[in-house]
Image (tube, rainbow, N blue to C red):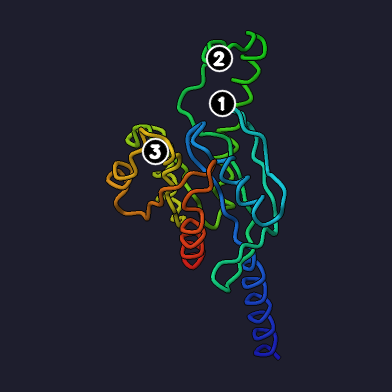
Amino acid sequence: MTIRIFRNFTKRMFALFFRRKKEVSLGFYGPPNAGKTTLANKICKDWTGEEIGKVSKIPHETRTVQFKEEVEIKYKEKNLKFKLVDTPGIATKIDYEDFVKAKMKKKAAQKRAKEATKGVIEAIKWLDDMDAVVVVLDSTKNPYSQVNITIVGNLIAKKIPVLIVANKIDLKKSDVEKVEAAFPEYEVIGISAKKGKNIDEFYESVFKLAKKV
């Protein structure tokens, strides 16, 4: 009797494990305006015909976690379902005056700064729900920033599989090699989420990342 109960319990646990893994929770993390939402939108458009959120030239357009479930991606006769989680940009300092400089009114700027600060906290909390993470960086900017080190440090501490995307390779100042040098222990893929450049290579890397889950 005891053996049968144990077998049934084990069978249920295996069933729950494999059912959960049929959908990989894939988080998009990175500093503000690196292109996280643009990339998430590109993926959603490719496979569902819908977008996940708004984009803007003003930092912190995304101030709450937004997600889309059961996004089925197909690559080379393989397919996987993902829960795509687009997170607010991580920043060590958020000053409403930066938004004022972007021609926002003071009251709106203060509101945006407050919401963005809450968004950073929310994004960090959501790490506990991630199976894997795509860190999206602006390849035209210095990758050795405190923000990037903080993000990657959190992922290392939580032992979450990581893919680093060097975005905006369509721009002249793009330097993918510098991003690779900054994070030699991770795979780095250069893309343009806006132009769709190297997106097939990105999908291949995502499938490799999912195998580590």
Q: How many marks?
A: 3
Report how far apart the C-alphas of labels 1 and 2 lie in the structure.
Answer: 9 Å
Q: Which residue is more in the foreground, 70 or 110?
A: 70
The residue at the point 41 percent across, 48 percent down is 190
Crowd class of label 1 (few under 14; some 14 to 19; many from 20; radius 10 Å): few
Amino acid carrying label 3: it is Ser
x and y, in percent, of residue 57 in the image: 56, 26
The residue at the point 67 percent across, 71 percent down is 19
The residue at the point 60 percent across, 43 percent down is 86
Residue 94 position (above or below residue 201): above
x and y, in percent, of residue 183 in the image: 32, 47
The answer to whether the residues at label 1 and label 2 have Cβ atoms under 8 Å apart is: yes
Report how far apart the C-alphas of labels 3 and 1 lie in the structure.
Answer: 16 Å
Residue that mark 2 sits on: 102
Q: In what element is the residue under mark 2?
A: loop
Q: Quadrant of the N terminus?
A: bottom right
Residue that mark 3 sits on: 139
Amino acid carrying label 2: it is Ala
Report how far apart the C-alphas of labels 2 and 3 lie in the structure.
Answer: 22 Å
Q: Quadrant of residue 53?
A: top right
Q: Which residue is more in the foreground, 129 or 33?
A: 33
Q: Which residue is more in the foreground, 134 or 152?
A: 134
